[in-house]
Image: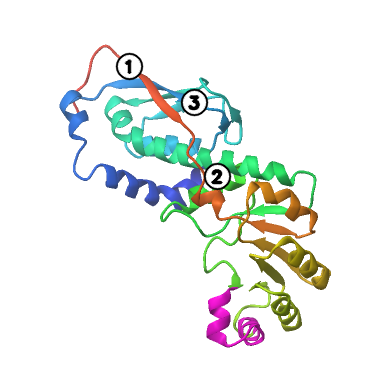
């Protein structure tokens, strides 16, 4: 989870780069109308129903601009929020609130949209053993935020990056010459604690992956009939993952086939943002101070 320590170690640089993207030299509008320091506050207002995610990132964005910034809220990540709900109040130097508003909202809207979308899809797998996974199809420089949002929405994370796990895909198989060779090379190279996953597109490839000793077999872009046959062929000798052409409408059908996992890139690349606004900004001190 994105607690204070994790935030500073893992994501501060991401947030700072996003702020630098938006403020290359100065926020000329804010500096023109607010030349001096002045404490203020603004309300964070939800404009549609959904699952909120990224509140700590929202606050951290302002903290990096103003170390006096604070956020008062009774809402926490994972809560269901409703249209018109005031989620909290952000306090700080008005200049920081104005300059950080868009970046902070970009994170919060994106993460909440992913959490909400994941929640809707994960409901289709309720009361069954199949778990919903994300993929590496994330927005560049947004992966820690997007994968966190998937978890908040009730999904599970697949490998975080290329260093995190072995997944032999079609082009790896082509490079090695066969599934058998690719698995053998992976097992020889990697520590014994690493599981080896193989992407398959046919029952023949499933059998080869089984014979080679794959720990996880991905059933890629298979129709339901072929997938059912593959699960029966594997018979628990490896974990199974369904991937490719996964839609909300298919999720329940897929779960009934007995696969262990179903992965969907759409969780991160196709989730709509949640509409959230920062409104009613006002000063909370009568005099401004010059730094």
Q: Residue 78: horizontal and vertical position, in percent? A: 61, 36
Give me the residue at 61% from left, 61% from top: 244
Q: Nearer the viewer, mark 2 or mark 1?
A: 2
**Do the residues bearing badges 2 and 3 touch, measured as CB atoms within 8 Å?**
no
* Apparent side of residue 279 relative to residue 78 in the rendered image (left or right): left
From the top left corner, tell me how far across and down residue 155 is, in percent. Answer: 64, 48
Of residues 112 and 235, the one nearer the viewer is 235
Q: Check residue 174 for magenta coloring.
A: yes
Residue at image mark 1: 282
Question: Nearer the N terminus, badge 2 or badge 3?
Answer: 3
Residue 108 badge: none
Q: Residues within 10 Å of mark 2 (few under 14, many from 20)?
A: many
Q: Is residue 169 left or right of residue 141?
A: right
Q: Which residue is mark 2?
A: 149
Circles 2 and 1, Cβ within 8 Å, touching? The answer is no
> Can see residue 63?
no
CA separation in Å, label 2 and label 3? 17 Å
Pointer 2 or 1: first along the chain: 2
Q: Quadrant of residue 196?
A: bottom right
Q: Which residues are magenta?
A: 168-187
Q: Which residue is mark 3?
A: 46
Q: The C terminus is located in which quarter? A: top left
């Amino acid at each position: 989870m994105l607690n204070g320590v994790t935030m500073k170690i893992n994501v501060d640089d991401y947030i700072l780069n996003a702020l630098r993207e938006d403020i290359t030299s100065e926020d000329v509008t804010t500096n023109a109308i607010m030349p001096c320091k002045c404490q203020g506050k603004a309300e964070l207002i939800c404009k549609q129903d959904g699952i909120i995610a990224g509140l700590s990132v929202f606050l951290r964005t302002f903290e990096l601009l103003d170390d006096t910034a604070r956020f008062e809220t009774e809402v926490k990540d994972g809560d269901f929020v409703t249209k018109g709900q005031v989620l909290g109040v952000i306090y700080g130097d008005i200049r920081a609130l104005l300059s950080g508003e868009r970046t902070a909202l970009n994170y919060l809207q994106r993460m909440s949209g992913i959490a909400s979308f994941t929640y809707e899809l994960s409901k289709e797998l309720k009361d069954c053993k199949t778990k919903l996974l994300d993929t590496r199809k994330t927005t560049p420089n947004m992966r820690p935020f997007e994968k966190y949002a998937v978890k908040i929405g009730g999904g599970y994370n697949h490998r975080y990056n290329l260093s995190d796990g072995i997944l032999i895909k079609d082009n790896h198989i082509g490079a090695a010459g066969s599934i058998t060779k690719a698995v053998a090379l992976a097992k020889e190279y990697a520590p014994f604690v690493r599981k080896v996953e193989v992407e398959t597109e046919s029952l023949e490839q499933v059998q080869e992956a089984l014979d080679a000793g794959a720990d996880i077999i991905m059933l890629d872009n298979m129709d339901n009939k072929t997938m059912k046959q593959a699960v029966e062929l594997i018979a628990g000798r490896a974990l199974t993952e369904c991937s490719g052409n996964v839609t909300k409408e298919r999720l329940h059908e897929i779960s009934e086939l007995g696969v262990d996992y179903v992965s969907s890139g759409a969780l991160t690349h196709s989730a709509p943002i949640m509409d959230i606004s920062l409104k009613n900004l006002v000063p909370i001190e009568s005099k401004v101070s010059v730094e």
